[in-house]
Image: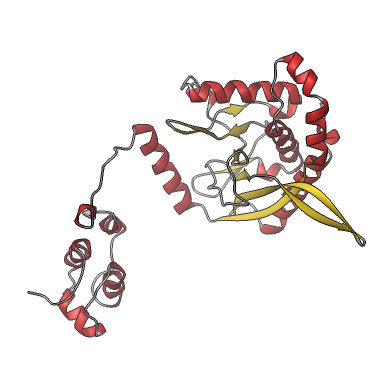
Amino acid sequence: MSEIIASPSTRRLAREQGIDIDALGEKLGRSTIGPEDITRGSKSGGAAPKAADATSYWNVDHSQYGPVNEEPMSRFAQVAANNLAAAQSLIPAVTHHDRADISMIESLRTSWKAEAAQRGVKLTALAFHVAALALALRAFPRFNASLSADGKVLVLKDYVHIGIAVDTPHGLMVPVIRDADTKGLWHIAAEITDLATRANARKVGPDEMGGASMTITNLGGIGGTAFTPIVNPPEVAILGITRSETVTIWEDDTPRPVPMVPLSLSYDHRVINGADAARFVTHYARLIADPRNMMI
């Protein structure tokens, strides 16, 4: 019996790669072998591992280490997982982080609270973000585009549709606000509430979930200071928002507390370079800081 210590999945991977695990242990001068040693050994000697062999890392009998329960993934979750994995592996994505002053937005929301109640509309900060993003996409048309499958053609869109990622009990859904650049804040706010409500009730149709120019994913109601959202193809960028915080801004020698919202823009580096991403977010932050610039 072999004296090499290795998990069953590691031994299976070694067999698939045609590697003698005992000889490998002797060569490395170790008595413990992990899956990374197998893949490294297959690259240095023998045939290169196939992409499908990566599944061996997940084919583990976890019950050998302790009690487990199994929960089947829904069909919806499986489709979403496959799409996210494909996007992450195919798109060379970079994330640019910044923040925006939301003093005026919060002031407007407070002063318009009575009007919001009268209209029966919940005016959230997200409505301002949708309006700002729509205008930013008009100002930076390369962000409102899609790359062809062969990477040879960039499709520039003459419409602005904003996807809103909604966290529902049955998985993430992304309903779309059509022609957001032509709609006012009250209209956008009402549409956000309607889409989010119907998404949670699984009453959003397929025709209401496709064709977005860019998606907003908002974790502000949960927490966090920054993250790296995955670009949702065929879009070339996605905007992540996290919980606002009070930041001290110095004006000469005088400190001033300012409510700021963190912004995380992930983008496809095949289409967008870092300088353009920085300019885009700077422009977007200016719109958020002074919402009078986006009133329709």
From this view, report whether residue 59 is shown above or below residue 30: above
Decide if residue 165 is in sight here: yes
In the image, 24 versus 87, the foreground residue is 24
Decide if residue 269 is in sight here: no
Q: Position of residue 229 (x, y in %)?
A: 55, 48
On the image, which quarter does residue 294 sit in?
A: top right
Q: Residue at x 30, y 58 (%)?
A: 54
Q: Position of residue 104 (x, y in %)?
A: 83, 38
The furthest residue to the left: 1
In the image, is 202 to the left or to the right of 15? right
In the image, is 111 to the left or to the right of 236? right
From this view, report whether residue 296 is shown above or below residue 49: above
In the image, 184 versus 251, the foreground residue is 251
Q: Position of residue 238 (x, y in %)?
A: 60, 44
On the image, which quarter does residue 179 sit in?
A: top right
Question: Which quadrant of the rendered structure holds the N terminus?
Answer: bottom left
Q: Residue at x 64, y 52 (%)?
A: 272
From this view, report whether residue 25 is shown above or below residue 147: below
In the image, is 33 to the left or to the right of 260? left
Question: Which quadrant of the rendered structure holds the C terminus?
Answer: top right
Q: Residue at x 53, y 44 (%)?
A: 148
Q: Residue at x 68, y 34 (%)?
A: 126
In the image, 181 versus 152, the foreground residue is 181
Q: Position of residue 34 (x, y in %)?
A: 27, 70
